[in-house]
Amino acid sequence: MDSRRLVQKLWNYCDVLRDDGVSTIDYVEQLTYLLFLKMADERARRTFRPEQIVPDELSWQTLLDAEGDDLEVQYRHILTGLAREGGTLGTIFRKAQNKIQDPAKLKRLIVDLIDKQEWSGTGVDVKGDAYEELLAKGAEDAKSGAGQYFTPRALTVAMVDCMLPTADDTITDPACGTGGFLLAAYDHIQRHHGCALTPDQRRRLAHGAITGTELVDGTARLAAMNMLLHGIGTPNGPSLIAVRDALSREPDRRVSLVLANPPFGRSSSIRMVGEDGRSSREEREIERNDFWATTANKQLNFVQHIAALLEIDGRAAVVLPDNVLFEGGAGETIRRRLLKQYDLHTMLRLPTGIFYAGGVKANVLFFERKRAREEPWTQNLWVYDFRTNQHFTLKQNPLRREHLQDFVDRYLPGKDRSEREPTERFRPFSYDELIARDKVNLDITWLKDASLEDADALLPPEVIAQEIVEDLQAALREFAAIAEALGATGTQVDAD
């Protein structure tokens, strides 16, 4: 069975469960638990080198044997028991709950949809691609908010194609979501170097060279399962996904490659509940000895964290919102340090309409860590404007990999950047030019919006309306955050 048929088979049942209040992302989460148990059962039963991953009393067979209310009781017992385990098991089942309250529908999902498929016998590509497609479908469920953990695959692959990961890299994503960047890097290595990999390189790639950090338990479990289905890590081995706040402490180790899209939202905060039961949000400034500036701006802190994560000559590609480019105070300090101590060599200005979170204006920053010296390391920042006169939507006109091919070609992956040639959309700006700008503002544009000069170039009304809605939603979220930070109480602003 190919991945598309496998996805359709599993996805059809989501509509049935949705009537019971099970959201798309909850459904994918329940599939994660059940798929893990089924694969563990297959490993325990195989003829060659059988492997016992879960205790018999918590096994897949106990679900097949149970009926009616006993099935729901046993399922909860399994989730609770495996949540106490360590390693990958603990990450996947951490704080797990049963969201399927109808025993008959749970039984059908177990017996008819999962048990009839031999998951361990399915190729890594098939089951991995199927799971990743399920995650993509889950991200489309706007109400669940799952889209904030999902970077468009076209952008992910283009960034990886620029960075050229190899089998000798140590790769991490400090805000890994469901693991899209990590898997794209692994896939690139397999496609371009797979035949030449040594046994040691294969072992290293599968057992620690690729890692991630994720704050949200539910998302971390999806990432851990996603990697497992793609052949990274082992069910009973150490977890390659750390479940914690990446910003809370200095890195445990340095890496050669960081790929990331840190979460949207500008402030790190702690929600406080008073004696009267009312809640407020207190901005949390991150103070670390390895940071250049102290700020509550989450994205600026991720820039500093990623800079600290890199080993000498390590490289990073990071999706960041526009405010990182122009915010004063700590933002200016961080930009000055990044330009001087690192080689901030390329920036891709992204169009709107490509993220599931509406109203996002973002960029990809490409930079490398260098040894200390007096002269600044950044000589030229090459800016590719892929925003002006570019319009995409999630459904009618989605971003595809070929849309980014010109940028990848101009980036010259693996070649000397001195060979780059400027084009209408791709221009270099020298270090002296950048430092001379007010507050070292990197929000640089030069192309003219065609719709301002030519009425025929105006977007269709429905697209303009959608962009207005997305901008208003983004503004409402900002105002809501400001109101909470000021200690506002009473009526909350609904950004939806």
Image: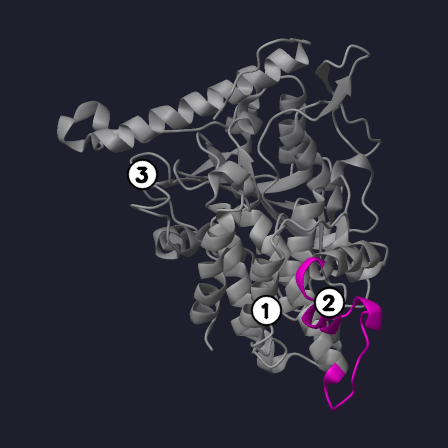
Q: CA distance from mark 2 to mark 3?
A: 39 Å
User: Does residue 439 appear anywhere in the picture?
Assistant: yes
The percent position of residue 209, horizontal first and vertical second, equals 73, 63
The residue carrying mark 3 is: 391
What amino acid is at disc 1? Answer: Ile
Kindly report the distance in space between the C-alpha atoms of the residues bearing marks 1 and 2: 16 Å
Image quarter of residue 292? top right
Q: Earlier along the polypeptide chain: callout 3 or callout 1?
A: 1
Secondary-structure class at tag 2: loop
- x 56%, y 48%: residue: 25
Which stretch did the figure color magenta?
45-69
Is residue 280 a member of the stretch shown in magenta?
no
In the rendered image, the vertical position of residue 111 relative to residue 479, given as above or below: below
Residues under numbered marks 2 and 3 in contact, where contact means CB atoms less than 8 Å apart: no
Q: Give the residue number, with chain letter if any, for mark 1.
A: 189
Residue 233: numbered disc: 2
